Amino acid sequence: MSLSLRKVKAPSLVIVGEKDFICSPLFANIMYSSIPNSSLVVLKEAGHMAHFEQPQKFSKAVSLFVERTK
């Protein structure tokens, strides 16, 4: 997986819930470490559905990322 991720050229945002049991923070860190020019956001007290569990924090993370990568 990480060899393919190294080929990603676009700025990328990896968002993971601290309690995500499907794509855990461990795997999110692997993605973040493998994708050049990527950012990682870990949402505390969120699981796999962080965008539903913490919509304001999720939206803020996406908005900040978009502003930084314009």
Image (spheres, rainbow, N blue to C red):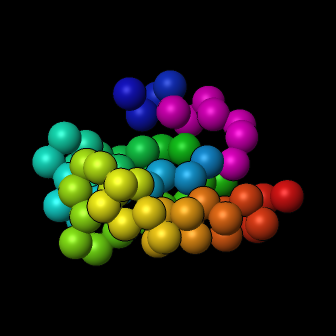
The stretch in magenta equals 5-11
The C terminus, quarter of image: bottom right
Q: Residue at x 58, y 70 (%)?
A: 60
Q: Is residue 18 left or right of residue 13?
A: left
Residue 7 within the segment the image draws in magenta: yes
Left or right: where does residue 43 sit relative to residue 55?
A: left
> Which quadrant is the N terminus positioned in?
top left
Please tell me which residue is depicted at 40% across the width and 54% down the height of the picture: 51
Nearest the eye: 56 or 42: 56
Against 6, is 17 above or below?
Answer: below
Magenta region, main secondary structure? loop
> Is residue 10 shown left or right of residue 51?
right
Any part of residue 55 in sight: yes
Q: Position of residue 41 (x, y in %)?
A: 45, 65
| Residue 15 included in the magenta stretch of the image | no
Instruction: State the residue at coordinates (67%, 70%).
Output: 64
Residue 26 location (% of width, % of height): 24, 53
- Residue 69 position (above or below residue 30): below
Q: How many labels, in total?
A: 0
Q: Position of residue 33 (x, y in %)?
A: 45, 52
